[in-house]
Image: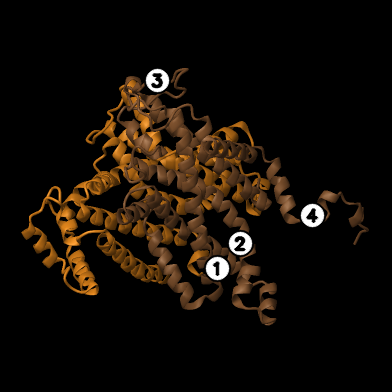
Amino acid sequence: MGIPLESHAQRPAADRGAAPWRQVLRRLVRNRLAMLGLAIILAFVILAALAPWIAPYDPLRSSFGARLKPPSAEHWLGTDELGRDLFSRLLYGARISLRIGLISVAIGIAVGVPLGALSAYYGGWVDLTVQRVIDVMLAFPGILLAIVLVSVLGVGLEQVMIAVGIVSIPIYTRLVRGSALAVKRKEFVEAARAAGARDVVIIARHILPNCLAPVIVQSTLQVGSAILWAAGLGFLGLGAQPPTPEWGTILSRGRQYLLVAPHITTATGLAIMLVVLGFNLLGDGLRDALDPRLKE
Amino acid sequence: MSQYILRRLALMVPVLFGVSVVVFAMVRMIPGDPARIMAGEAATEEVVERIREQLGLNKHPVIQYGIFLQNLLRGDLGRSTLSRLPVLDELGAALPATFELAAASMLIALAIGISTGVLSAVRPNSWIDAVSMFIALLGVSMPVFWLGLMLMLLFSLHLGWFPTAGHGTWRHLVLPAVTLGLSSAAIIARMTRSSMLEVLRQDYVRTARAKGVPEARVVLRHALRNALIPVVTVTGLQFGNLLGGAVLTETVFAWPGIGRLMAGAITARDYPVVQGSVLTVALAFILINLLVDVLYAYIDPAIRYD
């Protein structure tokens, strides 16, 4: 047993029992790719928010004289089959995609997280039942479940948000259940129960906060997935209906003019890819920051 | 081992039941008269009445479900409102094409994904690693059907190397298979890399190296085998996704598989076909997951005793 080379007080303030969140944040900020992802997301959010002010044209205004024009000084990304400015439509589409991403993730969290926590905490037949329901939902590949839901709910933007939200519920349920099962066995939960704390309090105060990290990582990645799923549904004609400038719907229309006006499909797809990339970069970075053991 | 398989099969039963309930409920939840929905807009009143009788739509929902299940087990999935052919025939015609595409895509995905993942893992933080992982990340960030359209634009429309659509020759298979394959390859590459890195840190790998085993043997003989275990799970999931997710790619390339059948049926409100194809894909997905679980247990004995 040696003498410590420096006392606790001599260690740099930054390392001295700094709140775990601060350490996580520091690791995240040092990850350049994660910061790139964050920058992309922020740019996307700002552009979407300011769309009504920065869009050079009305996204719904057709101009038959300017149909299928390639990118030019007048129309930065060209025009679509009705002469509408593509750049303006993509900007407004960003608002829609952002809404879809956030609302569907919110649905997934609001239903999936409590379900997973309750399932793990109570165990027994509650757990068995919930797990079987989740199994049935997971028996359908993601996009297929979304298609089934949209067939029932009807086509449209709100229906897509709900459908994509419901599809993400099993992911959160499984995730939180796994974390909650691990936490449930820890001493502080035993202690709380012995002290007579109510179940709801134990779940909310002790179990859920420890599941927070994987939920945050998953949510970041899930926004990207939601945008992809919604684009897929839009491409199949099940999403927002024309003339709404939803990215998937634009791709679907643009496909018919692939040879004569490839800029429509190319630009829209690049926009989707860039935004989803941003969320994936940030999500990966968060995962590494929250569990440095996994980082190589 | 057989205990494990039996247990998994037993767990499958409630899931199959649940899936059949979902598919049954699906059509009946659509606003409108289910008999009219199943018969189609163009059907006469007599046909609608006949369907109403056949499906027992006047009876209690539980009895209706019983009739549905009975028909299902007899292979009677109704008739397409468009073609008037039995749904089972339509599915039968479409399934081989879907399997053809799924198999070809999976081969491409595994070949590219595993080799890239291994290469990245044995040269971590090198430029090979950085470039391949970034490309893989781009791959999981882009819509699959957009990749298909871009490949079509370049290789079909501009270069004329491959047809844009259809089925019949190996040329028709290339673009859709590459589209789906590259997309899955990206996921498999990332998974293989992280799994491989984990395995390469293990003591037995260090021992093998210390014993003087050539690096190639260490990687391929000792490490890869264990690293592939989680990759098996991901691959299984991907195969399932290829069956369902192929909806979009099959639509882009007019590939006559189940995906395209389903997409067409949805647009045309041909609900018997929608119902039949959803059921088929879900069933295939469940079976594949079962196979993956069994394979996983075979490779990793610890799972069997869980």
Q: What kind of residue is marked 4?
A: Ala
Can marks 3 and 2 be said to lie on one chain? yes
Distance CA(mark 1)–CA(mark 2): 9 Å
- Of the numbered discs 3 and 1, the one sitting upstream in the chain is 3
Disc 3 from disc 2: Cα separation: 49 Å
Instruction: Residue at 56% x, 40% y: name it.
Output: A45
From this viewpoint, which residue is outermost toward the left?
Answer: B46
Q: Which mark is residue A211?
A: 2
To the question of a shared chain for discs 3 and 4, the answer is yes
What is the display colour for chain A?
A: brown
* Quadrant (top left, top right, bottom left, bottom right) of the N terminus of chain A: bottom right
**x and y, in percent, of residue A75 in the image:** 44, 22
Give the residue pinned by disc 3: A70
Which of the two residues, B97 or B211, is positioned nearer the viewer here? B97
The quadrant in which residue B118 appears is: top right
Q: Amino acid at mark 2?
A: Cys
